[in-house]
Amino acid sequence: MALNTMTDAGGLRTILQEVLNDLKDKHLYRELRVLQNHQAAVCTINGREVINLSSNNYLGLCTDPRLEAAAKAAIDEWGVGSGAVRTIIGTLSIHQLLEQELAAFKHTEAALTFGSGFTANQGAIGSIVTDQDVVITDELNHASIIDGIRLTKAARKIYKHSDMDALEAALKETQNGYRLRLIITDGVFSMDGDIAKLPEIVELAERYGAAVYIDDAHASGVLGEHGAGSTSHFKLYGRIAVQIGTLSKAIGAVGGYVACMQELRDMMIQRARPFLFSTSQPPSVVATCREALRIMQSEPELHQRLWDNTRYFKERLNALGFNTGKSETPITPVIVGTSETAGKFSDRLFEEGVFAQAIVYPTVAADKARVRTIVTAAHTRANLDTALGTFEQVGRELGII
């Protein structure tokens, strides 16, 4: 059946076409890559079998048969959906069990789950700050933090990335006139793979009477004991007011959570709009998250394999002469400069059997376009060696190395 073609609808189509054409001219237009089988170390994308270096599946749990079995059992017991928002009749007992287990994992009083890490940031920030407060935020924090702050009436100070002198200056400038000063930082920065200077941030916060809020999306399952995150990595339990975690990356499922003091959990249930107005996670997702937590805490070899692969791949990229910036984690960018070069590099890698997504402006600075690589515990040494050979071949072909 033929589709009806809409009119220009007040000029909307023309406006959108002009903007899209401009993005294409600037090499900023993105085509969706379509995954046609499992999210795995080697998979099929757009009909081509490739080594996958763009997945957040850090521990390889997306396809773990134990998680699949947990999901199927939950469907048999609970059905496929929760049927409502949490505050009406969408809170199942397994939601509460997962939150209790997350709080224990993060060494906090309480935890509350959300549909995504993005909405967890929006819900938490909006429940904490008002027009009486100021947020002090790293310039490279994730978009969900930026949007979460924008949706409040709080004042804001943006400090230069991981610059402790700039952070201290912001703390000094905001010593008077605010009810609360909230310092927000990523734990691991998602584009550069560097780790926040959390001990220094906490020391400054305590000296100047501020609270610390950390988004640990890319530290979850990666840093700390059993992958418990940045607070565990730096042994700062009890000194971080809010820890945001994700269930969508190393956990292998989908969702986000806030690990925090009991009072903040109670406040978010009253005020966090993404929590109040979103249907809760389906039982199958909750069950897979609980099983993933159990595996993470009982099988440290997964975490060890992730880091062995990370060190191996990063060291060899650097030895080949690629610019990997200041990465300290499995997120390893290969910085090439212009958006055009990054696009060509990514496309040629794909043609040769390696998928590494180009990242361009506005996600990163216009002159720091890159392909971003993420190795996982699921990659074999043979996978990594093949990928490294392809990076060398294409890098020399394009004059990057």
Image (spheres, helix red, strand yellow):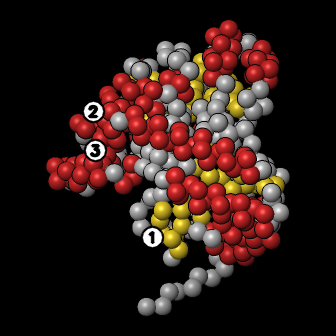
Q: Mark 3 points at which residue?
A: 287
Q: Is residue 96 left or right of residue 212?
A: left
Q: Which of marks 1 and 3 is nearer the N terminus?
A: 1
| Helix, strand or loop under label 3 | helix
Amino acid under disc 2: Leu
Q: In this view, does 100 lie above or below 122?
A: above
Residue behind mark 2 = 97
Figure label count: 3
Query: Disc 3 marks which amino acid?
Result: Ala
Q: Quadrant of residue 105?
A: top left
Residue nearer the viewer, 104 or 222: 222
Residue that mark 1 sits on:
36
For marks 3 and 2, give the CA distance: 10 Å
The quarter of the rendered structure image containing the N terminus is bottom left
**Closest to the observer, 258 or 302:** 302
How far apart are the two marked residues, 1 and 3, measured between alpha carbons?
25 Å
Q: Mark 3: few, some, or many residues within 10 Å (few <14, many ≥20)?
A: many
Q: Position of residue 127 (x, y in %)?
A: 51, 30
The residue at 34%/41% (across/down) is: 292
The 10 Å Cα crowd at callout 2, few under 14, some 14 to 19, many 20 or more, is: some
What residue appears at the point 64 percent right and 36 percent down from the top-left corner? 328
Per the image, label 2 sits on a secondary structure element best described as helix
Binning the other alpha carbons within 10 Å of mark 1 as few (below 14), some (14 to 19) or many (20 upward) gives few
- Name the foreground residue: 339 vs 375: 375
Residue, x 64% and y 57% (percent of image)?
Answer: 388
How far apart, in angstroms, are the residues tagged by discs 2 and 1? 34 Å
Mark 1 residue element: loop
Q: Do the residues labelled 2 and 1 touch (CB within 8 Å)?
A: no
Which image quarter holds the C terminus? bottom right
